[in-house]
Amino acid sequence: MPKRFPEWVNTEVVIKAIKMREEGMLSKQLNLWIEKLLEIEKK
């Protein structure tokens, strides 16, 4: 079975994505990616 997420995802990448998401600066696709990665429920 293939891995669910790429191996390159690290803490720095996730933290930057979270900050950008909070500021509303993520593209729709990246926002969906971070929601799935962190299992965030949509608002």
Image: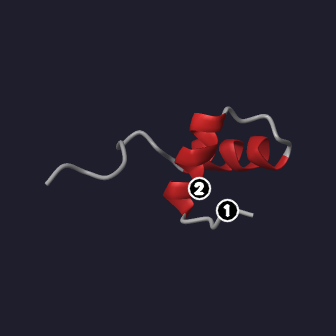
Q: Which of 9 and 33 is in front in this view?
A: 33
- For residue 35, above or below residue 9: below
Where is the N terminus found, in terms of image quarters? bottom left
Circle 2 sits in a helix, a strand or a loop, which is it?
Answer: helix
Contact (Cβ within 8 Å) of mark 2 with mark 1: yes
Q: Where is residue 34 in the image (x, y as percent from the top left)?
A: 58, 50
**In the image, is residue 27 above or below residue 19?**
above
Quadrant in which the C terminus appears:
bottom right
Report the residue at 67% width, 43% height from top. Answer: 17
Q: Looking at the rendered structure, which numbered label has been put on residue 42?
A: 1
Looking at the image, which residue is at 71% across and 50% down? 18
Q: What residue type is labelled 1?
A: Lys
The numbered mark at residue 35 is: 2
Q: Given this view, does label 2 or label 1 mark the residue nearer the observer? A: 1
- Colouring chosen for the image of the structure: secondary structure
Q: Which class describes the residues within 10 Å of circle 2: few (<14), some (14-19), or many (20+)? A: some
Q: Say how many tags the image has.
A: 2
Instruction: Judge left or right: residue 42 versus residue 1.
Output: right
**SS of the residue under disc 1:** loop
Return the residue nearer the eye: 9 or 3.
3
Residue 42: percent from left, percent from top? 67, 62
